[in-house]
């Protein structure tokens, strides 16, 4: 019954220490269906030793992750790399500058000649890409032998490929030159062919140098290649000076100077690699007794296959080279000055392209250490470390809820993506399927509406339905809107407003009944979010912050812009009555207050004009029908018309200022049309002379222009007086 009190006498195991294990009662011959009562072992039970439970295998210890490069280290690599990629372009510029002084025709021929000579090595650029990647991985794992094997193989392949390319280019120099020079072949082709033939002799050196540079970059050494190309640039400069300027060899002298400088760069780089032991032959295989204790050496063919795995880059480079060479051939066919100008222009352009090459080399040199098998990425390591705790919490309510939300968001996104395969819902079955899908997606907002991902994916899906299928989703959206807005931030509310605005613009007055409750819910959410944002901005200003630069101020402005745009769409789609019906009447005063605020608050003059346009439509719809609203027009809207023109941000020099003036004039014309003589008398006898201190002559002329009902004439009158008074900061 209680094994904890069991004591075994000495020698119970025949003088042997008991083996490790657990003591338990096991039936000696259990019967099928036999049941033991609590506290009983049953008849025939025997004391038996259970075998020890093996502990689960422990995963092998992971090596520490590589040290992350600092910004200083990245720049220390990038700046010399910039010199590596900029030097060939500078050499082309050097050639162009010397040849341009000698002959315009030779400078024109240098364009296609340089395109041919510089583009041919690109077909073996995959060797350099492979060398950088494979050497970087080898250095990251500390395998010097693998780095040496990659370097030797890549250099040998580069030399052999360079010889073949050089021979082919030499044989085809005349043909290629005639193709590239086009209509000007008679003049430019002989010069072009001479340059290409000389440069072809150095093509093996060019390819080998590029591979050697890649090997150095794979070892995070950008200084050695920079010194090599700097030496080549200096030799090219000296060679051009002697052969072109002094000896008068022209384009042939420039070709010889470039070829010799490339040979010198190759010699320097190969010497550096040899001193580092990267070109040394592999030692002979050890005796069998020693070889058995060592891991098998990767065959040389495996390295060749790994390098040749980068051959698809040939296709990429072929497309780029074809595009560039087509431009060069077209420019050469124009001949003379246009071809020469293209040569100089492309030399400058290639100098600017080096920034991308530097970023590529930086990534190839440093990233493989973090993506190797020995050093998994930090995110993967963190996920592996947290896996046990996630498994332990898998049954918790929080984890289950988050998992459900992510699955729902994924399914909603899939529905939106699938809908892109349909251009319409003409087929009844398709319409029914997507309608049911929308209802299910909106229904998920009930239990899962607290997930921002679910809300965002739902709004995206509804946008898709309205934009492509012209589907009125307001009926389904209305009951789900509280769930969509209950936990939304300013950006999500703005997205919901944009969605309903899209529906209004698509269906206009036909959605008057269904859009009314949606407008009420959206307006309430907008006003609540604006109050929260303004409170946060006020607190920030009180703490010494700058309101105009805060994130809250930017979110408030974006939300107001979206809301004013929505109101503008409503009133211009024959839906102004929606703002005054039973659902929205309690919110009308707040909406008008925000509109008046938008009329005066800057600095966006276009947004102010939009607010005045909304007020004009509301005046046309409600003016003269309700005395309370008429009073509101005189006491609140009329001062806003002139208050907007007195703001510090209002400048007549602004292109939008004239449109704002016209919107102000149009609103006052609408006020007069709806309120009649009482409004004209109030403006002429009370507001202009008493509030604005205007002269009688001004009041008379202003009232006459307003009575004429021409907003543009009133606009021009206001503009002229603002200019005369020095207002508007013109």
Image (cartoon, rainbow, N blue to C red):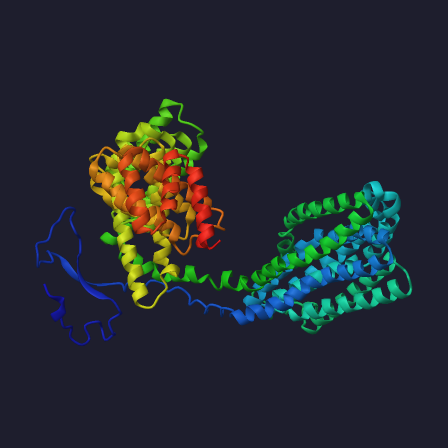
Q: Position of residue 606 (x, y in %)?
A: 42, 46
Residue placed most toward the observer, 472 or 152: 472
Residue 22, located in which quarter of the rendered image? bottom left
Q: Position of residue 47 (x, y in %)?
A: 17, 63
Give the answer, above or below, for where 458 lies relative to 76. above
Give the answer, above or below, for where 724 lies relative to 56. above
Residue most toward the front? 696
Q: Position of residue 493 (x, y in %)?
A: 32, 46
Drawn side of residue 269 relative to residue 476, left or right: right
Quarter of the figure that contains the N terminus: bottom left
Residue placed most toward the observer, 585 or 397: 585
Exactly how many numbered labels are in the figure? 0
Drawn side of residue 247 relative to residue 480, left or right: right
Residue placed most toward the observer, 196 or 9: 196
Q: Position of residue 637 (x, y in %)?
A: 30, 44
Look at 53% across and 64% down and name the residue there.
369
Residue 45, located in which quarter of the rendered image? bottom left
Drawn side of residue 447 relative to residue 555, left or right: left
Residue placed most toward the observer, 588 or 637: 637
Look at 39% across and 50% down and name the residue there.
645
Give the answer, above or below, for where 331 lies relative to 516. below
């Amino acid at each position: 019954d209680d094994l904890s009190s069991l004591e075994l006498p000495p020698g119970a195991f025949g003088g042997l220490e008991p083996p490790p294990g657990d003591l338990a009662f096991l039936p000696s011959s259990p019967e099928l269906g036999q049941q033991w009562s609590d506290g009983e072992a049953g008849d025939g039970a025997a004391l038996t030793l259970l075998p020890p439970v093996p502990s689960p295998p422990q995963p092998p210890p992971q090596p520490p992750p590589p040290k992350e490069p600092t910004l200083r280290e990245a720049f220390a690599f990038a700046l010399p790399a910039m010199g590596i990629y900029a030097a060939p372009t500078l050499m082309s510029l050097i050639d162009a500058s010397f040849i341009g002084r000698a002959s315009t025709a030779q400078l024109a021929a240098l364009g296609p000649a340089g395109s041919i000579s510089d583009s041919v090595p690109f077909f073996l650029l995959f060797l350099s890409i492979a060398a950088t990647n494979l050497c970087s991985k080898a250095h990251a794992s500390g395998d010097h032998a693998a780095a040496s094997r990659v370097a030797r193989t890549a250099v040998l392949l580069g030399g052999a490929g360079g010889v073949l390319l050089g021979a082919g280019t030499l044989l085809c120099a005349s043909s290629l030159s005639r193709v590239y020079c086009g209509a000007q072949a008679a003049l430019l082709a002989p010069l072009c062919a001479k340059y290409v033939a000389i440069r072809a002799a150095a093509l093996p050196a060019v390819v080998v140098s590029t591979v050697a540079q890649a090997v150095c970059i794979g070892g995070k050494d950008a200084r050695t290649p920079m010194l090599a190309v700097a030496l080549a640039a200096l030799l090219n400069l000296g060679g051009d000076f002697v052969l072109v300027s002094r000896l008068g060899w022209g384009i042939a002298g420039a070709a010889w100077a470039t070829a010799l400088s490339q040979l010198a760069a190759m010699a320097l780089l190969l010497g550096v690699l040899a001193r580092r032991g990267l070109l040394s032959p592999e030692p002979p295989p050890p005796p069998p007794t020693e070889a058995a204790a060592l891991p098998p050496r990767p065959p040389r063919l495996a390295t060749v296959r790994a390098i040749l795995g980068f051959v698809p880059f040939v296709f990429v480079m072929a497309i780029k080279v074809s595009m560039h060479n087509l431009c060069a051939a077209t420019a050469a066919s124009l001949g003379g000055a246009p071809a020469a100008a293209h040569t100089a222009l492309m030399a400058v352009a290639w100098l600017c392209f080096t920034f991308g090459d530097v970023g590529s080399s930086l990534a190839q040199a440093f990233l493989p250490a973090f993506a190797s098998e020995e050093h998994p990425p930090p995110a993967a390591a963190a996920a592996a470390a947290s896996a046990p705790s996630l498994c332990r919490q898998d049954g918790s309510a929080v984890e289950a809820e988050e998992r459900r939300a992510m699955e729902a968001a994924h399914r909603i996104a899939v529905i939106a993506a699938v809908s892109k395969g349909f251009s319409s819902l003409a087929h009844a079955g398709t319409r029914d399927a997507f309608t049911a899908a929308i209802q299910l997606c909106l229904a998920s907002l009930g239990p899962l509406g607290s997930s921002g991902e679910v809300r965002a994916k739902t709004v995206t899906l509804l946008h898709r339905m309205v934009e492509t299928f012209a589907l009125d989703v307001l009926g389904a959206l209305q009951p789900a809107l509280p769930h969509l807005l209950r936990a939304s931030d300013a950006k999500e509310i703005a997205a919901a407003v944009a969605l309903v605005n899209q529906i209004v613009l698509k269906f206009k007055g036909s959605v008057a009944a269904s859009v009314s409750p949606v407008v009420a819910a959206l307006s309430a959410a907008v006003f609540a979010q604006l109050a929260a944002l303004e409170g946060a901005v006020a607190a920030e200003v009180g703490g010494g912050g700058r309101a105009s630069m805060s994130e809250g101020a930017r979110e408030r402005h974006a939300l107001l812009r979206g809301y004013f745009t929505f109101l503008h769409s409503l009133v211009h789609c024959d839906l102004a009555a929606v703002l005054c019906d039973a659902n929205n009447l309690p919110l009308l005063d707040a909406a008008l207050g925000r509109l008046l605020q938008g009329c005066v608050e800057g600095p966006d003059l276009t947004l102010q004009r939009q607010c005045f346009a909304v007020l004009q439509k509301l005046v046309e719809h409600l003016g003269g029908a309700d005395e309370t609203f008429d009073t509101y027009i005189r006491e609140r809207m009329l001062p806003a018309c002139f208050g907007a023109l007195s703001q510090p941000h209002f400048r007549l020099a602004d292109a939008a200022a004239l449109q704002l003036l016209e919107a102000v004039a149009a609103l006052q014309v609408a006020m007069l049309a709806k309120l009649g003589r009482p409004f004209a008398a109030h403006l002429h006898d009370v507001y202009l002379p008493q509030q604005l201190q205007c002269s009688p002559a001004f009041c008379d002329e202003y009232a006459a222009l307003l009575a004429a009902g021409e907003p543009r004439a009133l606009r021009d009158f206001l503009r002229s007086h603002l200019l005369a008074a020095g207002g508007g900061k013109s």
